[in-house]
């Protein structure tokens, strides 16, 4: 009899996490791996294949969470951790160097159903800052912890710290050296951040779960040659990350200072909320008109997702690592403007 009961209940299992009366929603996930000067001529076929494979693995990891009924935030964190653990992206393991040759990481998450958020900035010894950002949201009354305070909090949460050498990659080191040489040539002792090719590579994710809830996350090493202590848009709510069930969830990538000054993601949300614009119209306006007018072309992009599963990925740079699995279960990965 008990066996029969279990058999009868089994098909209902995936819906069990939903509140009574709620219908299961379609699920979707969208990610970026940074916008910048990504051109075919600079990329070997092997390198391109690696980027596409890692983006695919990240998307599938997040999607698997959504499929089993986990909240969208779980999906974002799981997907972003895949990219943080890869040396290819400017987040976690593959982060860029500051002007003084250190790695300083920023990350944040936000949940669309209650606007709760958490972030960390300028952390130097945490391999997965996105997981720490989530803990700030869940375990503290605060939104943003920085530097040593964030590291001390990580220790209290049982997170193993890593030495700075964990983050060393020859490619990022060479990029800094090139930039420093350029600074010396032009007598710029302070340095100008991130103007070399492939300076970007920040990662971000937005997801829609079976409960119809949105979430988003962003993680970055910032800009090559940035001043030590500089914090970009990525850990700042409304600038480099945002999620509101009423509008959209998204993540930005580009020259963070402009995203901060424009409050870029919150602006998209406001255009949707107060002007009734679609996500597509608001995101395109913000990235291809407002950001271009204010900061010029080549300054960045974003990814976003609304509650109906509409996905956007606008950018004004030559390329942006990006991809999604939409509500039809279709997986798409793109790097350049056309493919
Ligand atoms: N937005 C990041 C920052 O300024 C960089 C990036 O997206 O590549 O820190």
Image (cartoon, rainbow, N blue to C red):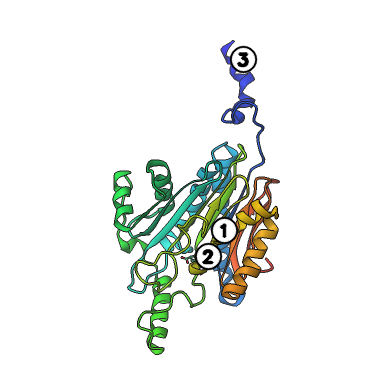
For marks 3 and 1, the one nearer the N-term is 3
Packing grade of label 3 (10 A; few <14, some 14-19, many >=20) is few
Q: Number of numbered discs present? A: 3
Q: What residue is drawn where x is 61% and y is 26%?
A: 20
- Tag 2 and tag 1, C-beta contact below 8 Å: yes
On residue 259, the disc is: 2
- Tag 3 and tag 2, C-beta contact below 8 Å: no
**Left or right placement of residue 143 versus residue 338 in this view:** left
Foreground pick, 47 / 177: 177
**Left or right placement of residue 170 versus residue 25 in this view:** left
Up the image or down, 257 lies above or below 150; here it is below
Where is mark 3, residue-wise? Answer: 4
Packing grade of label 2 (10 A; few <14, some 14-19, many >=20) is many
**Residue 303 can be seen in this image:** yes
User: Where residue 80 sits in the image (x, y, percent)?
Assistant: 49, 53
Task: Give the residue at the far top of this rendering.
Answer: 1
Foreground pick, 264 / 215: 264
Up the image or down, 253 lies above or below 298; here it is above
The secondary structure type at the circle numbered 2 is: helix
Foreground pick, 35 / 215: 215
Packing grade of label 1 (10 A; few <14, some 14-19, many >=20) is many
For marks 2 and 1, the one nearer the N-term is 2
User: Where residue 60 sits in the image (x, y, percent)?
Assistant: 57, 48
The secondary structure type at the circle numbered 3 is: helix
Label 2 CB sits under 8 Å from any ligand 1 atom: yes
Q: Nearer the viewer, mark 3 or mark 1?
A: 1
Where is mark 1, residue-wise? Answer: 265
User: Where residue 53 sits in the image (x, y, percent)?
Assistant: 56, 58
Label 1 CB sits under 8 Å from any ligand 1 atom: no
Q: What residue is drawn where x is 44% and y is 69%?
A: 223
The alpha-carbon separation of the residues under discs 3 and 2 comes to 57 Å
For marks 3 and 2, the one nearer the N-term is 3
């Amino acid at each position: 009899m008990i066996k029969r009961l279990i058999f009868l209940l089994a098909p209902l299992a995936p819906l069990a996490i939903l509140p009574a009366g709620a219908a299961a929603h379609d699920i979707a996930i969208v990610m970026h791996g940074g916008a910048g000067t990504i051109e075919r001529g600079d990329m070997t076929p092997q390198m391109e294949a690696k980027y596409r494979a890692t983006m695919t693995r990240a998307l599938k990891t997040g999607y698997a969470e959504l499929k089993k009924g986990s909240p969208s935030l779980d999906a974002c964190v799981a997907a972003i951790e895949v990219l943080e653990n890869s040396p290819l992206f400017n987040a976690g393991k593959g982060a860029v160097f500051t002007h003084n040759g250190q790695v300083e990481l920023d990350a944040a998450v936000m949940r669309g159903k209650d606007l709760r958020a958490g972030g960390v900035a300028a952390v130097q010894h945490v391999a997965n800052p996105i997981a720490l950002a989530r803990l700030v949201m869940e375990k503290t009354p605060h939104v943003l912890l920085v530097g040593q305070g964030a590291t001390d909090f990580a220790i209290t949460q049982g997170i193993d710290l890593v030495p700075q050498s964990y983050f060393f990659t020859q490619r990022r080191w060479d990029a800094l050296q090139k930039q420093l040489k350029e600074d010396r040539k032009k007598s710029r002792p302070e340095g100008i951040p991130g103007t070399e090719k492939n300076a970007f590579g920040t990662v971000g994710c937005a997801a829609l779960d079976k409960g119809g809830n949105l979430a988003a996350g962003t993680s970055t090493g910032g800009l090559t040659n940035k001043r030590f202590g500089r914090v970009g848009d990525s850990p700042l709510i409304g600038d480099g990350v945002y999620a509101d069930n009423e509008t959209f969830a998204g993540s930005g990538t580009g020259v963070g200072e402009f995203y901060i000054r424009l409050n870029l993601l919150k602006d998209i949300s406001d255009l949707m909320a107060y002007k009734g614009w679609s996500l597509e119209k608001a995101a395109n306006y913000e990235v291809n008109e407002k950001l271009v007018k204010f900061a010029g072309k080549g300054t960045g992009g974003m990814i976003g997702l609304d509650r109906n599963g509409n996905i956007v990925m606008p950018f004004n740079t030559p390329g942006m690592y990006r991809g999604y699995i939409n509500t039809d279960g279709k997986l798409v990965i793109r790097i350049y403007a056309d493919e």
